[in-house]
Every structure is written in structure tokens, then in C-alpha cells.
Amino acid sequence: MGEIKVKPGICRICTAHCPVVVTTDDGRPIQVKGDPNGTPYEGYICPKGRAMPEMHTDPGRVLFPQRRRADGTFERIPSLQAVEEIADRLKAIIDEHGPESVAIYLGGGSLAQIVGVPMGVALLAAIKSPNFFSASTIDKPAERIALAMHGNWIAGLRSFNDADAWLMVGANPVIAKSSGAPHNNPGMRLKQAVNRGMQLIVIDPRRTETTRRARFHLQARPGEDPTVLAGMIRIIIAEGLYDREFVAANAVGIDELRAAVEPFTPEYVAERAGVPADQLQAAARASAGATRPGAIASTGPSFSLRSNASFYLVLCLNTLCGAWVREGEAAPQPNVLLPAFTPRAQPQGPIPVFGKREMRVRGLRQTTTGLPSAALPDEMLMPGPGQIKAFFCFGGNPVSSWPDQRKAETALQSLDLYVQFDHTMTGSAKHAHYVIGSRMSLEVPAATHLAEGLKYLNPGRGFEVPWGQYVEAAAEPPADSDLIDEHEVIFRVAQRLGLQLKWANVYGSCYTETPTRLIPLDMDRLPTLEELLDLSLCDARVPLEEVKKHPHGLVVEEPVIVEPREAGCTDMLQLGDPLIMAELAEVAAEDFRAERADPTYPFRLVSRRANNYMNSILVGMPVAARNKHHNPLFVHPEDLAGLGLRDGEVARVASRTGELQAVVEADDTLMRGVVAMTHGFGTSEPGVEDGTGRNPWLGANVNLLIPNDSDFDPITGIPRMSNIPVAIGRGRAEAEVPVPA
Ligand SMILES: Nc1nc2c(c(=O)[nH]1)N[C@H]1C(S)=C(S)[C@@H](COP(=O)(O)OP(=O)(O)OC[C@H]3O[C@@H](n4cnc5c(=O)[nH]c(N)nc54)[C@H](O)[C@@H]3O)O[C@H]1N2
Ligand SMILES: Nc1nc2c(c(=O)[nH]1)N[C@H]1C(S)=C(S)[C@@H](COP(=O)(O)OP(=O)(O)OC[C@H]3O[C@@H](n4cnc5c(=O)[nH]c(N)nc54)[C@H](O)[C@@H]3O)O[C@H]1N2
Ligand code: SF4
Ligand SMILES: [Mo]
């Protein structure tokens, strides 16, 4: 044992951003626990957070910049040499193909690296490339699109804390942590809320850890969220249960909405979605009868097509039920590390959904959520002006996470310059020209501002209380390594290209009340990560110096009271957006019986998440796998019997465009006819995991089943990633399963 130190930290594996305490032995992390002094979290931590020491000390960690050789193997090169080579290649590409040939992608891993991506954004701005992509557009792009169509409420949604009804559509926060209930131990918060009388309503085709707490579990067929939500709204309007006064004063479009939901009678919803009429009525009445209701949607409806309609109808429910916070009440989520704003009981009316930039493929365009990442592989592959040739991937794993895995892989292979920032050699990284390892999350200072900004994406998400934390590095990077931070790589590249970079001081968003301030960086001197973080937070509501005095985080106790509507404010919320009303007419006109009756693909595959992994993060690590290294296909036991398959056998799963092999696991929480699988596993090499974890990248990647260019939403570009028609049969015999070397 060397010198033992214990320091506070922030887990940034997911957006819950739990406060933790980190024990190090000579700087090397040996234990991460929940921080009992991180007040709202009360010492909570999940298995992923506890696995951080293993992530940091993983023998496979990328400790030196890696350059790919012609034969596909990698060689170690000095970090400054890597930077020079990247800069020179980038310059040649820009000179030949123009700035539009350069793109960056922000993945889930960049939550840990909070100054890397802003530096990448600054580089794009300096070279005048519009190509900023992020995982947000293959996550829940509809949340901001629906918000743009419906309008936002400046003071925000009433808090989950004292909500007396809460509707969650396709969210399982007990597992996913930050998707529909407060971040601080969502399982416990839900339990406490239900115990104090909150009526929890969950729409999910599975009986999940979250639905177990629900007063109403509407076990609807997947993909039927617009039907179910329209049915609820129809009841609420027809029975006059909505908040007439609030709607009259703050919203337009109720007549259009009333007409659009008319076809969705309880009987129709019952037949189509499988939700009994009395359950639908009871859930609708519970939502509308509550005095402090709230509604939220997550990846279930996002992945099942018609996501804009689902998210929009959730916002309509919030407006109809008067869920927005009123004048004189305490603002639910005043900023701490983000800039101060005046919470007003007034709408910010609809804003344009589309931005200027048009993609070259499928008529897709920039939206309020950004450029559609689902189009990225095509933009890399399609020749002609605007083809993406240089790609910087910040903590993302396209080969794992992008729909149409084979296309994603081919696209990455086609690039002239692919730089991957990651601490592990993922299925994506092995195609990169350069793989750059940086300091990992516990080795750098960090703050909670990104998680604070979630409320700007989806009202109701985010911290339960005004919470802020800033921590210093808790661990030291491994000795004898040549790690180089993402911001440093990009800054030095810009220096070599003679560019002036400008730093954006806030987490930019169209609803951030304070406009982004661009601060020119001194290009003669590399700024430290600390300096950049300070610059990002220079307009924090609670001065950063104050937050820093509370290393275990602080709750800002003093309430911020919601101000009245400004004189002269004429903004109104929109309940009858024409695009969504037209989409509801399309939904009502669908021949759902015929669509369902395809005998070739009798099952519907839905998405779900696993407790021990965050997307592909931690996949393949023994500490997370707990002796189960594969990615099971969950099937109802009676469906299994019907297929003649037994628990643990290998099944073949085929969609209309792809297939995979997976180990089946009996799961009676599913609706009959619905099967479920998580993503994050496997390269595109065929086969199933061998169960030993020796080759974590081999196996069942669900994106083999998902095309990105058919069956997609025309606005978000997001393809059908849940509710996928599939056929299931017996897979290869066990003996044929390849055993990786
Ligand atoms: N079929 C299907 N596809 C999906 C989904 C699904 O449910 N089904 N989910 C979608 C969703 S919601 C999302 S958000 C996307 C996620 O898409 P991505 O963000 O592209 O995928 P992740 O697996 O989260 O990749 C995170 C990467 O970051 C790396 N990483 C972790 N920590 C660090 C760090 O500190 N620094 C750096 N540089 N890297 C780090 C990890 O090793 C990993 O390779 O996938 C989407 N794709
Ligand atoms: N442990 C863990 N936590 C995570 C992640 C992880 O991989 N593991 N990933 C993180 C990320 S990137 C994200 S985006 C969030 C996601 O957070 P959530 O959106 O809460 O993700 P899930 O836990 O998959 O819950 C989605 C639910 O939708 C249901 N569902 C599927 N299809 C449909 C449908 O058509 N309609 C309805 N109503 N429901 C449907 C599924 O059964 C599932 O229970 O989680 C984050 N947190
Ligand atoms: S819930 Fe998220 S932030 Fe909290 S410990 Fe788990 S992975 Fe980390
Ligand atoms: Mo996500």
C-alpha cells in the first residue's frame, strides 16, 4: 500500500452525475463509493459508478497515442507527433475538399470530458464547417423538436418533488437513472413519491422495474404511443377535465387538437394498442385530476417512429393539465452553474424547427436538436461536394451505436482522416487512423453544468433540487503514459493551422436565457483544463468560487420565486401544430391490422437498457459482466415454448434487412409477441458472444437489424430502432459458435 487519499468526485458515466468519494492508492483509484455528503443523493451510487476504478486501471486502456498501420495493426507514436500529423492531414483535406469535408461527433463518453467537445466546436467554427453531430440526434431528437413546435414555459415544469401525478412514456429510470425521474437515486425517489400519494402512470410494453411502482401500467403495444396519448387527450378534452383557465390564457390550437384526437376513442385505442378502455380512462382522469401533474417521454417512443407526435402530445398533456409552474411558486430548477435567469410564468412561443443546413441524403435537415447523426454514414460514403472526409469522434462508438452497423463500419473505413478519442480500443476505434487516449474522468476536474442543462431538452428532466458541484481531479493518470487531452489535441491542431479559436461560455441551447458569449482564446499558450472550465462557468448564477468552496456539492436553499407574465408578452403555447395534426391523421388512417398481420415477421423487437452498462461503456469488462458477457434476446416464456426454444439456447433473429444470433432468456415481463434486446454489444462480425468475455466486441449488435435509410422519421431522420418486425428461429448449434482466440 502506498499513500491512501480520499477525495470527492462526480461520476459522469451517465447524466445522473452522482457525487462520489474516490479512494486512491498512490494516485491510482481503488474504490469509488456514493458520497454520503452529496446531500440530495444520500450516498447513492450504481454498479457502473462503482466500476470506475476498473475502467481507469483496465490493462487494455489506451495510454499512448496509437497510429494505424496499413495492415490494420497499431503503433505507438509520441503525442505531439500525432498532433502534427493530424493537423497536416486535416489541412490537406480542407485545402482539397473544403471545410465541409470535416465533421465531429460527440458521443456518450464525452460527458466525462467536458472541455473537449467545446474545443472541437470552436475548431469547426474557425474552419467554418457546419458539421457538428452528436448522439442526441439518435437518442431523443424529438424532445427538442416537439418543444420547438409546442413552445416552452420559461419557469419550467412543476417539480417531481411534490407532483401528485407523473406520466412516463417509454422510460425506465430505475435502470436508466436520468430519464424520467430525479437523478438522485431514481428508484428510491419514485418509491418515496408513490408512498406520499403520487399517482405514477407508465406506458411501456414491458413490466419494468419502474412499472412495478406504477398505479397505472398501460402495457401498450410498442409503437402505439401516439394512439394511447391521443386517446388520453381525447378523454381529457371530451370530459372537460383540462385546465380551461390556463389553456385559455396561455395556449392556442385546442380546437385543432380536439379534432385531431377525435378518431382515438377508448375502444379504438383498446383494439389498436391493447390498453383496456377502463385503464385508459382511469389514467387520463388521474393525470387531469391531479393538481400538480407532470409528463415525460423517453427512448421508447423516440425509437418507435412517429416520435415527434409522441413527444408533442406529452407536452400537450402538460399544458392541458396545467403542469407548468405558476407565478408566486418556487421555480423548480433555477440554475446553479448555468447563468441566472428570471423564471416567468409565461410561454416562449414556438420557434422554427428547421435550421439552415440541408443534408445531401433523404431530404434530411438540421433541426433544433442538431444535424441528424443517422445521415452521417451516408454523408461519409456519398461522393461529391460536401462528402465528409475527416472525422473527429469524441467519446462515441459508431460501430456499436449507429443504426445499420455494417454501413457505419464501411463509412468509417472510407474516411481520409478518422481520429477517435477513447480510452479503449472499441470496434470503432480499430478503424481510426489515430486513437488518442486522454486523462479519464477521475483524473480531471469536473462540474455538473451539463446535467443541469437537461431541462432545456426535455422539461421535467434534471436535478430534483438546485444542485451544483465542482471537483478537482481525484486520481492521477497512470505513470509512464503519454496521455493527451482532447482539448489539447484540438488546440494544438488549430495553432498549427494558424486559426483563432473562440470559447463559448455557456452550454448553448436555444432556451438558454443568456446568449452564448464567445471568448477569444490566447492562441500562443495552451489553456489548462481548469482554465477552460472556469471560462465555461464564468457566468454561473452561483459564482464558481462559491461552488468550489463546497467540494461535496451544494444545494441552493433560497428559493427563486416565479415572476408574473411580462406586460406585453403575447407568446402562446401551440396545441395544434399543423405538422403534428397531419401526422395524427396519418396515424388514424393506418391499416394497423394489416401492418401487424405479416406472418413472416411475427415478433416486435423493442429496445431496453441494462443496469451494468452505459450503452457500450463497460461492455466486456469483468466487473460489469458478473459472469454474463453476452447480450440476451429476452422472450416471453410462452413464446419461447411456441418457438421450441429453451432458455440459454441460441436463436437467429432476422429483420427485413439483417440478422444476428443471440442467446435467448425467458422473460415474463414482456407482452406476448414482443421481444427485447439492449444495444452496445458486438462488432459486425457474425456470431454470438462466447460467454467468456474474451472478445467483448464479438456478438449480438442489435444495429445489424436496423437500416438507416428505410423506415425513418422524415424530420429527425431517426430510423425505427424499437418496435422492429422480426422473425425468430433456431440459431446455429452451440458447436458452431465461433470461439474467439
Ligand atoms: N439499436 C440501438 N442503437 C442505439 C440505441 C439503442 O437503444 N438501440 N441508443 C442510442 C442512444 S440513446 C445513444 S445516446 C447512442 C450512444 O452512442 P455513442 O455515444 O456513440 O455510444 P457509446 O456506446 O455511448 O460510446 C461511448 C464511448 O465513449 C468512450 N468513453 C467513455 N469514457 C470516455 C472518456 O472519458 N473519454 C473518451 N474520450 N471516451 C470515453 C467509451 O469507451 C465508448 O467507446 O446510441 C444510440 N444507438
Ligand atoms: N444502466 C443504464 N443507464 C443508462 C443507459 C444504459 O445503457 N444503461 N443509457 C443512457 C442513455 S444514452 C439514455 S438515452 C437513457 C435512456 O433511458 P430510458 O429511455 O429510460 O431507457 P430504457 O431503460 O431503455 O427505457 C425505455 C423503455 O421503453 C420501453 N419501450 C420500448 N419501445 C417502446 C415503445 O414503442 N413505446 C413505449 N411506450 N415504450 C417502449 C422499453 O421497454 C424500456 O423499458 O438511459 C441512460 N442511462
Ligand atoms: S447513476 Fe450514472 S452517474 Fe450515478 S453512479 Fe451510476 S453511472 Fe454514475
Ligand atoms: Mo442516449
Image (spheres, rainbow, N blue to C red):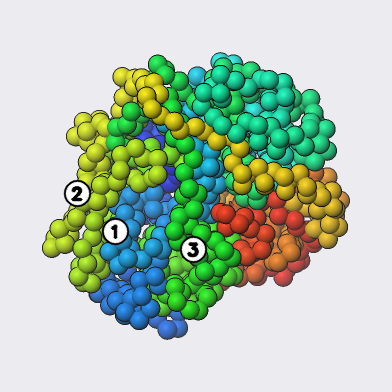
Counting residues from the start of the chain, the first of labels 1 and 3 encountered is: 1
**What element does badge 2 sit on?**
helix
Amino acid marked by disc 1: Ala
Marking on residue 531: 2
- State whether residue 465 is above or below residue 590: above
Residue situated furthest bottom in the rendering: 70
Residue at x-position 32% and y-position 31%: 341
Q: Which residue is mark 1?
A: 122
Q: Nearer the viewer, mark 1 or mark 3?
A: 3
Q: Amino acid at mark 3?
A: Glu
Callout 3: SS: strand
User: Which label was assigned to residue 606?
Assistant: none
Residue farthest to the left, as pictured:
524
Q: Which of the two labelled residues, at mark 2 and mark 1, occupies the earlier sequence position?
A: 1
Between disc 2 and disc 3, the foreground one is 3
User: How many callouts does the rendering have?
Assistant: 3
What's the residue at 59%, 70% (across, down)? Answer: 406
- Which residue is rendered at x = 72% and y = 45% of the image? 585
Residue marked by disc 3: 358
> In this rendering, does residue 279 appear at all?
yes
Q: Secondary structure at mark 1?
A: helix
Using the rendered view, name the quadrant where residue 485 is placed: bottom left
Q: Are circles 2 and 1 on residues that touch, CB within 8 Å?
A: no
Q: Ligand 1: does it lie within 8 Å of the C-beta at label 3?
A: no
**Relative image position of residue 557 (x, y in whole percent):** 32, 20
Can you see residue 45? Answer: no
Badge 1 density bin: few <14, some 14–19, many ≥20, Cα 10 Å: many
Q: Give, as a three-letter code, the residue at label 2.
A: Glu
| Spot occupied by residue 719 in the image (x, y as percentages of width and height) | 62, 57
**Percent position of residue 686, x then y:** 64, 69
Quadrant location of residue 269?
top right
Say which residue appears at 51% left-offset and 59% top-offset.
365
